[in-house]
Image: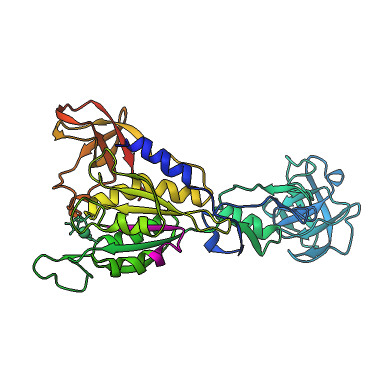
Amino acid sequence: MFTVAAAQAVVLTHARPLPPETAALGASLLGAALAEDVHSDIDMPPYDKSMMDGYAVRTADLADGRGELAVVEEVMAGQTPRLPVGAGQATRVMTGAPMPAGADVVVMVERTRITDGGRVHIDDPGLQPGRNIVTRGREMRRGDAVLRAGAVLRPQEIGLLATVGRATAAVIPSPSVAVLSTGDEVVEPPETPGPGQIRNSNGPMLLAQAARAGGRPHYLGIARDRLDSLRPLVAEGLQADVLLLSGGVSAGKLDLTPGVLQEAGVVAHFHKVEMKPGKPVLFGTHDRGQGRPPTLVFGLPGNPVSSFVCFELFVRPAIRRLRGLPDSDPTASAILSEDFAYRTDRPTYHPARLEVGDGGWRVRAVPWFGSADLRGLLEMDALVVFPAGDHRHKAGTQFPVLRLED
Ligand code: AMP
Ligand code: MG
């Protein structure tokens, strides 16, 4: 049986970035990986620009930064100066306005006053040529590579794309993630479960996890534990970049998922991992041809906490790869803050709460009633990894932890 680390490595060998697509510039690009180098089509700023509301003047006219000058013109942002600033002259400029010829400095308006005669009096002893001016091309020059392929788009990158005139950009798209619940006993949330029935918590939860990981989730409904119900829904799910099935992967009589996947051409790379919860987890790939990367198929055990943990351990890193993002390692090390006696036959990802203490992270195992107990996860923001065996873990001992996203 694979260890978690070995199983994660197998998943990653099959997860390749999706082919780039051209997308319109906008908020929907947030978090996407850029798939092209982007060059500037302009100098920025496009002209020598005033950074202050004030007066464009010549330092030569002001001994010790003092003097009185004639105001020849007013230039707002968006206007172009018509007159040069000659000896003894000043131009009123607003923030963002182009500099008039002849001036070599902007005196901020707070350092000036208008005299009774309508001239401007300046008193700014610290005045140096170039103050409060950004020269043309200072930020970037036309032709500069301002963004490289692989850059992850945050608001500032999106703003920069707009600055250099891009209405579209080549990016790695968000993977589509199909979610299929399975089970004869599973009913949709509005229904009141009858005897032996259980509400479909995994469907909405996995859709939300997929969205949080940056996927584009869609729901396929509940497949019943019958071949004629599973087959068409699996076929539909195999159109997606990622197919998540919940339930039906254990060794029960009606755990039909592995067989149906195999029959549909899914090659299984592992089935069962040395872990708790989530041991029955299955991972396979389905070749889509046409140069497209294979569909990644995850058979997640039906117990809600197993599903949740398997998603975080195996599906989330895979979605990052499909999105062209660098791998991120959410594991850390933390000191157990309270004694915790725990017996388990496999390495266990136990719900836990992290806090920052004096010597780094401190972790506390939260009460939990096993792999069906979703309510026990409400307090959780991490998983602490306990080794197999019958242990009385002592406060102060270091353990690996897996930090979960907010
Ligand atoms: P299975 O993996 O199909 O053997 O299911 C394991 C356990 O998880 C059973 O108790 C199921 O009733 C439960 N279960 C399966 N699917 C879901 C689901 N979508 N939502 C909540 N619980 C489920
Ligand atoms: Mg089942």
271 vs 172, nearest the viewer: 271
46 vs 298, nearest the viewer: 298
Residue 42 left/right relative to 304? right
On screen, residue 377 above or below 392:
below
Q: Look at the image and say whether residue 285 sits in the magenta stretch.
A: no
**Residue 114 visible in the picture:** yes
Q: Position of residue 223 (x, y in %)?
A: 28, 67
On screen, residue 244 above or below 145:
below
Q: In terms of image quadrants, where is residue 203?
A: bottom left
Residue 73 left/right relative to 403? right
**Quarter of the image where ligand 1 sits:** bottom left
Q: In terms of image quadrants, where is residue 217?
A: bottom left
Residue at image position (62%, 52%) is 35
Which residue is the extreme one toward the front? 263
Q: Position of residue 160 (x, y in %)?
A: 65, 55
Which residue is the extreme one toward the bottom? 191
On screen, residue 232 above or below 285:
below
Quadrant of the snapshot with the N terminus: top left
On screen, residue 65 above or below 386:
below
Give the residues in magenta.
Answer: 235-246
